[in-house]
Amino acid sequence: MKKRETISDYELLALIYKSIDIETLKEQDKAVTKKRVDKLFQDLKGHVKKDDPDISEEEITGASDIKKDADLIVVNVDGASKGNPGESGIGVAIFDKDLNLINEACDYLGVATNNVAEYKALILGIKLSTKYNAKRVLFKADSELMVKQIKGEYRVKNAQLKLLFTEAQGLLKKLPNWKIMHVPREENKEADLLANKGVEMSIKSG
């Protein structure tokens, strides 16, 4: 009889998503192997979850009613982490084709790394952008690592980032035409301010 694994696939994905190190899990359960984790990521590609459990639209500060059927929208995204890992937040600033600010949102994540925060910000940005039914969407971010991973120029090696990468790619498929580009931090100041506002939300609620 096959021995029952002490950590289910669902629990394993949840633990990885919450930044639990794979090596630590291996020490706790010998059933956690690289082959098993890789298979979970492969299976996940066809079953990307619709909603991020850590970010619900009701909790997003600044989300508002959206004017649909835009020709082009520009979505600036940024993540902030005070400590890397540390208290973190995300920010999204959406502009029309004339670069007028038409929507903004921020949220507090909890303790996370900079890279995790950057991906979470992108995911939120994609979710908000789908509501515009825009013909074209341009994402801007100051995280060169994330941008090059989304473009396929860099491999995603970190287990938690693989989950976020897969989720982002699944959401991007809902957009008819999109591009992502790396910009200097000074060209991403609106999203940066919102991300830091997200971090401050934890201080105010504490």
Image (tube, rainbow, N blue to C red):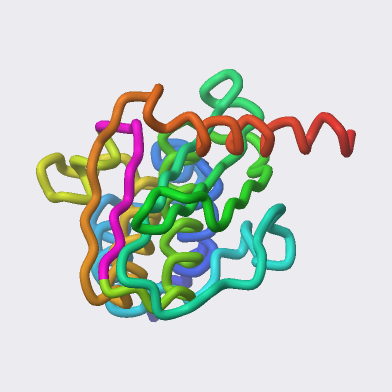
Q: Could you tell whether 49 is left or right of 112 in the image?
A: left
Task: Tell me which residue sits at (43%, 40%) in the image.
Answer: 118
Against 167, residue 1 (above or below) is below
> Where 162 falls versus 188 (above or below)?
below
* Quarter in which the N terminus is drawn: bottom left
| Viewer-side residue, 87 vs 178 | 178
Q: Where does the C terminus fall, quadrant-wise? A: top right
**Which residue is pictured at 29% across the width and 40% down the height?**
146
Name the spot of residue 95 as percent of width and height, x first.
Answer: 44, 53
Q: Residue at x 16, y 50 (%)?
A: 151
Q: Residue at x 24, y 76 (%)?
A: 176
Q: Which residues are magenta?
A: 136-144
Whether the magenta-drawn stretch holds residue 142 is answered as yes
Q: Quadrant of residue 37?
A: bottom left
- Residue with the most extreme left position: 153
Residue 88 vertical position relative to residue 13 in the rendered view, above or below = above
Residue 27 visible to an observer of this rendering: no
In x, y percent, where is residue 60? 68, 57
- Tell me which corner region of the image, top left, top right, bottom left or bottom right, holds residue 26: top left
174 relative position to 87: left or right: left
Magenta segment includes 166: no
Say which quarter of the image contains residue 44. Answer: bottom left
